[in-house]
Image (spheres, helix red, strand yellow):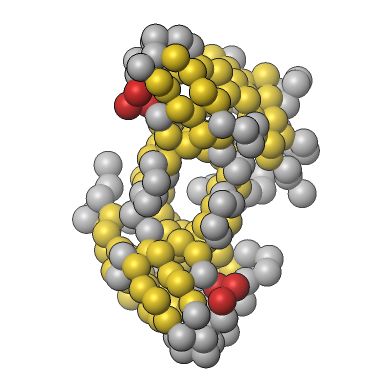
Amino acid sequence: SAVISQKPSRDICQRGTSLTIQCQVDSQVTMMFWYRQQPGQSLTLIATANQGSEATYESGFVIDKFPISRPNLTFSTLTVSNMSPEDSSIYLCSVLMADTQYFGPGTRLTVL
Amino acid sequence: SQKIEQNSEALNIQEGKTATLTCNYTNYSPAYLQWYRQDPGRGPVFLLLIRENEKEKRKERLKVTFDTTLKQSLFHITASQPADSATYLCALERTTDSWGKLQFGAGTQVVVTP
């Protein structure tokens, strides 16, 4: 199994600013993912972050808006850039180990 | 693109009864389908995975069925308990060649009353 922590757990930000979310895993994993869960909705995949390669983004998400780093096999960051109120969501990282996907607790972001 | 449908109405059920949740998808049959539990303010927790060549899978009080002809999965919680109250999500892989990239349904909230 994998234990995942995220920082910050929540934040309130002003529009136009940026926030970097950290994801730490207690074991080395190759595949890491970032999801967004908007209020009252389900999870939507933002991008896949594999160590040693550029992140791959899903349709509707771009690197300029959501730059991702993956410096090693236990850590990743997601930045939400130039924020607007529409970016208010819960952002979750997850890792894939064997057939099981483990999720972090999420970062609740509110943009004013 | 794949569309995943779960009953958006909350399922209210009495303790001890069986809760049955439905997950329907519209396009290709995925290689596997997963069910997760999500509590308020927390990330989803993996419960069960069922592959396309499996009809049924069980884990303790949980049972999942997978009918690729109907394009449907059923999730059962037997002998339900108040602690089972949560939102339950089904998930399929994003595309046929994208291992680990999950597409989630909107989830069904289950409320178990004593």
Q: Position of residue A56 (x, y in %)?
A: 56, 68
Q: Quadrant of residue B27?
A: top right
Q: Residue at x 51, y 86 (%)?
A: A15
Q: Quadrant of residue B29?
A: top right
Q: Residue at x 42, y 59 (%)?
A: A92
- A42, A4: nearer the viewer: A42
Horizontal arrangement in the rendering, residue B30 relative to residue A91 (left or right): right
Q: Is residue A25 above or below residue A12?
A: above
- A25, A86: nearer the viewer: A86
- B57, A17: nearer the viewer: A17
Q: Position of residue B87 (x, y in %)?
A: 48, 37
Q: Residue at x 75, y 21 (%)?
A: B70
Q: Position of residue A16 (x, y in %)?
A: 52, 90
- Count numbered badges in the picture: 0
Q: Is residue A61 above or below residue B34?
A: below
Q: Residue furthest bottom?
A: A16
Q: Residue furthest front?
A: B114
Q: Position of residue B54 (x, y in %)?
A: 56, 18
Horizontal arrangement in the rendering, residue B85 relative to residue B103 (left or right): left
Quadrant that contains the N terminus of chain A: top left
In this view of the protein, can residue B18 be seen by the observer?
Answer: yes
- A41, B33: nearer the viewer: A41
Q: Is residue A41 above or below residue A53?
A: above
In this view of the protein, can residue A74 be seen by the observer?
Answer: no
